[in-house]
């Protein structure tokens, strides 16, 4: 990232310039310690590997409010009228993108422009900002990783959007999706995300899950076809989350979502957008969800954040645990790295992180934590010790009867026949040894 | 259940005869209060609906030991030599089946006969008991709901069975499966279950999930084909469980298992065996897992137990929460009831329930709790109020554009066009109203 | 409850009169099925036992918003200016109290009047409504169970109130507490509650727990002394909650709060207000928390609601699980029943329960569920079977050496000497038998 | 640790010598990478700071069995008769202690000698091994950190030990405690631990918690007095754990146990032994539990292990997460370090870590992870940046009215008077900044 950054008529984050790499000993809170964008790792720069994106909602809309308290964060545009605020926010956002050095951004329709009182206003407002975005993209080189439709905040969606029991609401959701896809193509988005905040149920007693799931499949196929017709060539993403706001959400986790994608014939076009905090809410590790997606050939993009192991809701914290980012980057590197996807910081500074600089510091934390993850994962992969252990562990399937088994050439009788005399060796999993190795890579 | 029961040379549960229905006011701990086997509900007797099965392992093998304590339950056969004990256990088991009035039983190979020191002994012991079982089945009319192979207790399976990184162990597992299927056919089993206690991982760092999943699929197809070749015409079951003993298990929950079944081309032959305690460990309700299975046409059988909402391991308690059995029986009745499956009490009396009569009392609790579930679910379905609410809730998809949408006849543009002017009504989900209704059915 | 109810100039809940008891077969959604206020149980009416209170915040302020969506509930006063709205809300609230037949209500300062732009406005607004409340209390006979200060919604409290690291904020909190206590005395409140939504931490890294806990103790002693000086003779309550909104909250659970109360010398004046949903978030059952409080002589009042076993946040649902209310009422009856406390419905209808009648139906559900709990708990206690089992179980401590032990008259050597020869009997805990009994009481 | 180590007649861990420090680049699995015992940190050696202890049960008794599988670990003494095995185990244990370089060890009575068929055999066997231990202690310099009585494995304790409803069982427990204290004094133990595996309940329905808690208090006072009489001058420890094996355990967490200790008048003699895995099972972080204990002046010793955030039972893994050990060592260093206590590895190698060297590797992992924790915590404390942030955050209480408040010199009116005009500043908690700093200390 060069020291250049964008400002419009007004600079919003005054006193803060472009964030630079100063190395691990820097005591400047407003510098990267580990993220050196131009540094090459395994043939690509850190920036090319990590493809960081800024989440419009958390960074420029979320005001620190939570279920027990109102806004704690002030934004300079808070007291302007809605459309003026939307313009100011867009300027501030691109100032932030270029100062922090993020190549991408992501947004919901509802983040960027007021929904207005009717469909026409919704579209008019949205397009007005979309045109601003295109201008700012051209000026700055920042690109759209993905956008999405907010089908969960408005009370009309309280019973779901595509899975709403009322057809009229389903139809209204389609209108939003259509508009969002139109805007996506206009902005050259590399992906488009579905997150079904209310696609699920509050109570099974009043829910026909089977019918709702069928509606969701039909709806997504319609959306896919429309997007392809208007020239969208990127990836569609489904973002799994097990619960919250609904009691149960249909896109529970990666495995559930993959099953749905295949059942509905969507696997050519859809990929998963895996969020760390959603993984842990579903009882999985981040790495597990990434691996499940990768194994199915459906790993698309990542919502880079972190949950709290003691809290049972979506805390959406900035990632700071390097173990987690190392494990995540292992999967991402092994799967060949991102194509259309990237690392979107679906993360919010804490309610009590009220200094404007905290928005930068929190992202610096996130960038650095993933830069460490990338650097260390690459070191582990390059050294080959872990991969050699893995290869050796499964080597009995590389030749002979093991290979025949793997190819499906044996009957159960044949396999059992082998089992009758095959030596039964206890082979240590060496878990603690590998954990020691990992700490050597991290702290050695 | 008639008052007749089986005893062999020796009566094991002396002082306890056949358990009879005495009605809700009975103060006899050894009588059914709600389970009246011959009572007709919706055209079938309770016994025909519920198809209760006794789990050999918990009832005749589990000795109250837990990770912090050794056996607390004494059995008369405990001090006999292993094969004598196996014979005595078989006699005791059929005495219990007929006294409690269960039409079915279930077992692992390792429950019923000593594994011996080698394959030949394993098979010899197993077949000796299998022949006893067939005789006892003929004498008593008790039938085999399903059997299964214990591929998790022996240390050879510490890294998995079908998913073991060592091909030799996979082959050894095949031998066990082959034997179990042979025995199943000999005993006329109505189903055969796979529960993969070690099919999963302890650490992702030393695991190739993709290769292991492929092995599992291959293995199951081989087992399926073998079973069909030898005349097994029943249902194969996969029993989901998210974790324990492994850190993560591949058959995590119903949705994950269904995805696997379909991916592996097993959906014609395999169904799910849903366990309540495994549902809650996976973050779902019992009813949810049953509904997911039913919606996929893959609901096969049920492991009838209950977990503890405050404890994070598989407590396998006898079911006593009538809300849960009502919800479960709603799904089961709506899906047409069991065909090959039934309600298998995969449940153990508590470590400190050390009276021999506690084994009966615990099963009486389970039978009665499901009998209440059946009775009340039938009442709710028969009254039709809840079903009418559901039908009305989705009625906008029964005709007109809603029906067109459901049939996939609309494009996104057409749907969005409808959404542009469609009235957006907030329709209450009436959750508290339905909860009030349910309490009226239960306590009114 | 007579059929009379209060309305002011305007009736807010038109079409709904006073809710009456119609019995378990009624199909009127707007009638009690199990709560018969005048019915006598163990010498007191249901109404006297249960002492229901309505929570002002959930019933008249909460608008269905959640972290992912804005208001879904409309109130007639929503579009009035803040003080007018406050007046209308007060009228509506008392109309609701009298129609539903609740003898008590509870509120936060922030629920009832706008906080204004400064301290003077805060106090002026608050007192204006307090005077209205006193008039309405006099007219209707409805009484104040407790009020409390909202020290968590305003961003000034984002780092805590009494435990804020900034002394100025602590002082500001004191002003609110002083005002709330003044209002309490004016309204004849029977209790006063402290719920420390932000008294805890977001991160241990920036927190001095010891100093914060000491501040909290000092603060509460000051508040206690002030209240006593101005004539408050009721109970002070602490309401435990483990987390949310803070990552960790100091009043984690009953045991933690009791430890704190005693450490700080508050045990003469303070009692616990136990909430079911907070119990389960802390890993306990509702009954456990009530019993812990009761055993310490510190059971004061109850926030009557219910959580979701699959969701990890405070869902504050209306109670519908009769097992839970039976267990709760067992503890409450055994402890002698409420004195100053009662059952406050700290519960909100679901976001999608948008019909105005749902507010009534949800409370009817709650009233009925606790009425069932009371009726069935009383039946269990009156029958004496469970109490006899308990008495017998501990009878070895009623006389002889067991009694000496209990009185502390033995040395370890003496006790060990007894142990050397004392017979070691395994005595069954009879858990499944008791669970069977409970189902007989509930469904027999 | 010198390269010298103890072996008896037989060397058990052949091929493995004393484990030495080889530094972070070593590729020798059997060397320390970060634990350099003689290295000085803040005036003490690593060895003096960390006071590592080996848990006899996990290292020399636990055989890899779990609720779903039997032993996977072989020990050379497994097939000897029980007392011979006990002797061999003792020799092997001291060989291990000296090879790994642990200055301390810990044990239960049941770990070290067979319980025998009666009290006399129990005591005879136990004392025979105790005498061996004293000889081996003298030879090697290894010392006893603490011992404890196993009051949970034998079925007699299935309903509890000190809290058993049957007085005879309580008395039997006393005999075990007396013997364990006698042995402790004989071996010069620095502490004595109570872990109440069955002190809790399986069901509240058959439990009188209040009476049981009183029994526990009486019992502990008797044990304390006995120990003091026979010359035990070390610390008594209570080890909190929330559940497992019981459904609920009375020593739920640090706060609960502290409340109990004070209520029962035990605070002069008792301290807490905090286990990481028990902390997380109770919904807390390790650091939280340590801080709570430290703030009460009751931090005694530590069971050094780690749980699994996705598994809800006591997995007792070797610690490998350096974040957790840094946080733990921050509390321990700030509280002045251990006096009688130490870091006891209450941790077991995984069931599938079946190589004998895995026992060493697992401990090396644990030693290194805590050595990193110590080194990095010391660096953070020495640099002072974090402490300065903390000091500044609370500085408003260091003088003026804030200090008066802290001293309890203000009335609520006075405090409220200050609050009326005190400026209300939003001060950022700087959480993300501190998290960034921590990553710099760890990875910079
Ligand atoms: Co996300
Ligand atoms: Co999230
Ligand atoms: Co099962
Ligand atoms: Co289970
Ligand atoms: Co509450
Ligand atoms: Co709550
Ligand atoms: Co421990
Ligand atoms: Co533990």
Image (spheres, coloured by chain):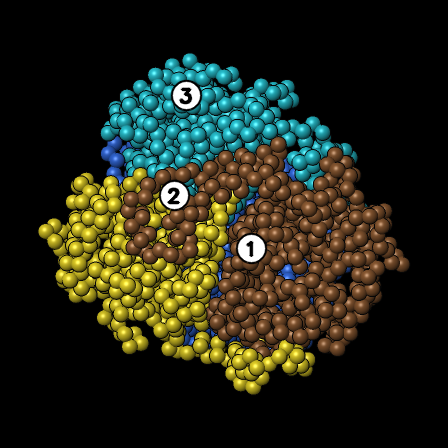
Chain colours: A brown, B yellow, C blue, D cyan
Considering every residue shown, the one lying at the far left of the view is: B9
SS at mark 3 in the image: helix
Residue A22 x, y percent position in the rendering: 78, 39
Q: Chain of mark 1?
A: A
Residue at 51% across, 16% down: D2
Q: Dots 2 and 3: beta carbons under 8 Å?
A: no
Per the model, the C-alpha gap separating discs 2 and 1 is 26 Å
Label 2 in the same subunit as label 3: no
Q: Is residue D129 left or right of residue B6?
A: right
Per the model, the C-alpha gap separating discs 1 and 3 is 48 Å
Q: Which is more toward the observer, A396 or A340?
A: A396
Q: Is residue C399 left or right of residue D263?
A: left
Residue at 71% across, 41% down: A34
**Which mark is on residue B158?**
2
Visible residue check, residue C365: yes
Image quadrant containing the C terminus of chain D? top right
């Amino acid at each position: 990232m060069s020291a250049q950054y964008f400002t419009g008529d007004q600079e919003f984050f005054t006193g803060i310039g472009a964030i630079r790499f100063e190395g691990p000993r820097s005591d400047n809170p407003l510098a990267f310690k580990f993220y050196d964008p131009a540094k090459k790792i395994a043939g690509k720069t850190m920036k090319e590997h990590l493809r960081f994106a800024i989440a419009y909602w958390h960074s420029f809309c979320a005001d620190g409010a939570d279920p027990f308290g109102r806004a704690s964060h002030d934004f300079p545009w808070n007291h302007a009228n809605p459309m003026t605020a939307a313009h100011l926010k867009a300027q501030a956002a691109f100032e932030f993108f270029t100062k922090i050095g993020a190549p991408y951004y992501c947004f919901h329709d509802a983040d960027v422009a007021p929904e207005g009182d009717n469909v026409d206003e919704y579209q008019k407002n949205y397009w007005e900002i979309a045109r601003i975005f295109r201008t700012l993209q051209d000026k700055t080189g920042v690109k759209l990783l993905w956008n999405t439709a907010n089908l969960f905040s408005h009370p009309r969606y309280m019973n779901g959007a595509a899975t709403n029991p009322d057809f009229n609401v389903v139809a209204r959701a389609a209108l939003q999706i259509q508009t969002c896809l139109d805007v996506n193509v206009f902005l050259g988005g590399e992906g488009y995300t579905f997150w079904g905040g209310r696609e699920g149920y509050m109570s099974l007693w009043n829910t026909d899950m089977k019918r709702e799931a069928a509606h969701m499949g039909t709806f997504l196929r319609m959306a896919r076809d429309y997007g392809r017709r208007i020239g969208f060539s990127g990836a569609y993403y489904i973002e799994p989350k097990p619960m919250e706001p609904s009691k149960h959400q249909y896109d529970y986790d990666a495995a559930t979502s993959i099953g749905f994608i295949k059942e509905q014939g969507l696997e050519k076009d859809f990929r998963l957008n895996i969020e760390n905090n959603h993984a842990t809410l579903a009882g999985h590790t981040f790495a597990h969800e990434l691996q499940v997606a990768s194994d199915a050939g459906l790993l698309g993009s990542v919502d880079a954040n972190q949950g709290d192991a003691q809290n049972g809701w979506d805390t959406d914290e900035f990632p700071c645990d390097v173990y987690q980012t190392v494990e995540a980057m292992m999967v991402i590197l092994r799967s060949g790295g991102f194509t259309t996807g990237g690392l979107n910081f679906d993360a919010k500074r804490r309610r009590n992180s009220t200094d404007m600089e905290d928005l930068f510091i929190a992202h610096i934390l996130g960038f650095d934590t993933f830069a460490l993850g990338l650097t260390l994962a690459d070191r582990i992969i390059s050294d080959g010790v872990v991969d050699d252990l893995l290869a050796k562990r499964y080597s009995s399937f590389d030749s002979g009867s093991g290979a025949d088994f793997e190819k499906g050439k044996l009957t159960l009788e044949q396999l059992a026949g082998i089992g009758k005399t095959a030596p039964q060796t206890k082979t240590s999993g060496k878990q603690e040894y590998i954990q020691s190795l990992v700490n050597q890579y991290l702290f050695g």
